[in-house]
Amino acid sequence: MNNFLGQEVTDPTDFGDDKLSKLDASLRCPICKEFLDGPVNLNCGHSFCSLCIRGSLQAKTECPCCRSHALESHLKKNLALEESVISWKAARPVVLAAMTRPSSPPAAAADDERPTKKRRLNTTPSGSGSSKRSSFASTGNGNADTPIELASSPPPHDDSSPAPSPGDLVVCPACSKRVQLKRLNEHLDRNCKDTPVPRLEPGKGLGNFFTRPSESNPPSSSSSTASKSKAKPREPIAKFSYDAMKVHHIKAALAKYDLPQTGAREALVVRLQHWVEIYNANLDRREALQHSDASLRAELKRWEDAQAHLLAKGKTEVPEDIGAYEDAHKADFADLVKKARANSLKAKAQSQQQPNTPAISKTASQSQTAVSPLRRIDEDVIVVD
Amino acid sequence: MAAIAPRRLTKELKELTMGECPAGVQLLQSADFETWVLSLEVLGESLYKGEVFALRFRFEPQYPIASPEVTFIVDDKFKAPIHPHVYSNGHICASILGHEWSPVLGVASVCITLQSMLASCKKRERPPDNDRYVRTAPASPKKSRFHYDDDTV
């Protein structure tokens, strides 16, 4: 059952430990229960995958967690949360492996904590255990503190007095290389691996905080032709008012994003709607994780196929050529008609045998469908005649 | 959105089978991702002490954006509880199954809500319009428009 989809499905219950399960659960989207993908916040502070909450808001304009009013325009991406999710995803298998290792599983250490503390006051036998625990804790703390210590303590050269300007070289708190201040965030985001010329598109990321006004993105560029918009940093697509659009408007919008323009109006609208959703949701991922337009198009195609498949499953199939279908199944139809006639004759015979039964017989009043009692009444009327 | 339902249900199933199942709730059938059956029992002192009910969940492909269809099973083995919000055909009048559904809810939370709905009941009776509703009810309670008027039970 678990490999129903041919892939492993991870879940907070993978950790027997309560605290770790909670940590795991806290980094998941409450809607899809997956790790947050392009996490966004609402005004109330709750976070979801960008795509999930967009779907939910389309159904209902409220926060699924607290029911406070929410709109798609309120969505704000949460880069720090995304960072935590990515780090946890990487750390998860390590933690799981460490837990299954027989020697000193961290969960057990945490459980020991309270009893040993109490006992330590009176007796010493548990000393070995507690010392082991404390050493474990201290190394843990040391590891956790290292980056923070470095970050908070000023670099060796004591030049803390004048605030450095964006162009100045500063010492990176993590790798102690010299980096331009305006590039520092970018540099840290890359785990201190420097690319030759960090030319992250200037419109996005933290790095642009300092450089925005000069050259980055003149706002006029957004509404130009489609070919231009590809080279520029991607902008979210503004919502269309589908009801007011003529079919050729919708097709033009689809053409702008290189999407298929087949199907009836309804299909076009659904396609464009979902495209806007996944396109905008994609922009809430960090730049490095954003999908290309081509793969978004593939995603849209997959979604449409799945949707069509599900719809087909829900409906009974309607034959295309009804005449041919009738010819092919003539015998079946005749058979059904014969059976129905026989049944109705039988029913008549029965009701004639007991002509004094009241209009609504016991069975009819018990049955829950509205149709059968009515038919009963009709038959009785016929009998009376 | 279509891809969420099976994955999310897999996770819920895992949670229910890994012992996170709420007390008094048991998974009876979950062979596919369309219909699940769970048994429901009200623990502690209540009007339904000792009775076991069965709930049928039907999931649409749009789940969890769309609410699941939840009914009490009425057959030879199980009966619908006699409760002012439960019709004798098993349909349940509960706002969280209708317009107050939220995608953060799930199978477990629905079960808990229904448990507490039963536990807080003061009087065993059918809804006042039970006969009329049952006679004309659509097959799926999601198609009927309930009027939620009583917040106390």
Image (cartoon, helix red, strand yellow):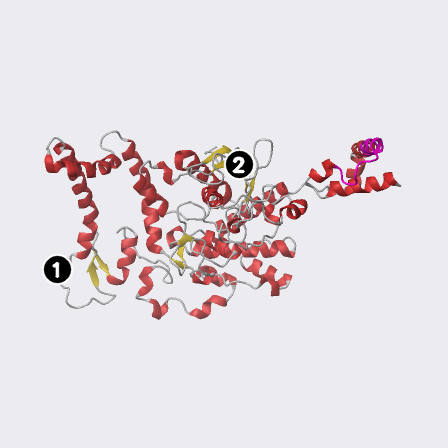
Q: Quick one: B133 or A100, which is closer to the camera? A: B133
Q: Secondary structure at mark 1?
A: loop
- Expressed as whole percent of the image width and height from the top left, the position of residue A169 reads 21, 62
Residues shaded magenta? A343-361
Chain hosting mark 1: A
Tag of residue A157? 1
Q: For the point 53% across and 35% down, which residue is it?
A: B32
Q: Quadrant of the C terminus of chain A?
A: top right
Q: Quick one: A49 or B56, which is closer to the camera? A: B56
Q: Is residue B88 visible?
A: yes
Chain hosting mark 2: B
- Expressed as whole percent of the image width and height from the top left, the position of residue A375 reads 78, 41
Circles 1 and 2 on the same subunit:
no
* Kind of residue at disc 1: His
Name the residue that disc number 2 marks: B54
Q: Is residue A283 above or below residue B21?
A: below
